[in-house]
Image (cartoon, grey):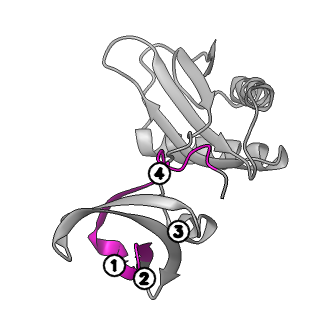
Amino acid sequence: MKKIETGQGLPGETTPKAAIISRLEELIRPLVESQGGDLVELQYGRPKRGRGILRLFVERPGGITLEELARISRMVGGLLEVHDVIPGAYTLEVSSPGLTRVLKGPEDYQRYVGRLVRITTHAPWEGRQVHSGILQGLKDDQVCLKEGESELCIPLSEIARARLDIDLKNTGKEG
């Protein structure tokens, strides 16, 4: 994970967090996309005392390299210096969302069809709260997975968390 310390602002300057996040996304998303990446998630927070922190999770089909993340980090740092969106000092972190990345929106459920996923529901669904299977996609606002020989569809509204999973039993096996 690459960290760059940057950012200047006026002491005591206050801007609503939602407005800062919105402006950051507006500036950063096109830059990341121009580099062939996808801004998966942007997190911004400022503790009561100390530096703020801006975390960007960036990916690209086929994976993203450390060099690409470092380049994006430098570009974002320069962009934020010019636009001065974040009040005060902050730390910028740019990384990949990882192999077990969170699935956030409907587009993720289409993008990762055929991959192993783990879904946790708000309440038990079909007798269980945690489901693992091969993602079949999104059908009528329901996420469908193949668990063994059967297909299970869970309404988006029932999903508390969903993420890609790794099949450790079959890792490294030819098939």
Examine the rendered structure and indicate whether residue 98 appears above or below residue 146: above
Amino acid residing under circle 4: Asp
The residue mark sitting in front, 3 or 2, is: 3
Q: Which residue is mark 3?
A: 109
**How far apart are labels 3 and 4 at the CA level?**
13 Å
Answer with the quarter of the image where residue 6 lies.
top right
**Mark found first going from the N terminus, 1 or 2:** 2
* Badge 3 or badge 4: first in the primary sequence: 3
Name the residue: 42% across, 38% down.
17
Say which element carries label 1: strand
Which region of the structure is painted magenta?
Answer: 144-173
Residue to which mark 1 is pinned:
155
Q: Residues within 10 Å of mark 4 (few under 14, many from 20)?
A: some
In this rendering, would 31 be left or right of 9? right
Q: Quadrant of the C terminus?
A: bottom right
- The residue carrying mark 2 is 141
How far is the residue under mark 3 from the one under mark 1? 12 Å
The label shown at residue 165 is 4
The reply to whether callout 1 and callout 2 are in contact (CB within 8 Å) is: yes
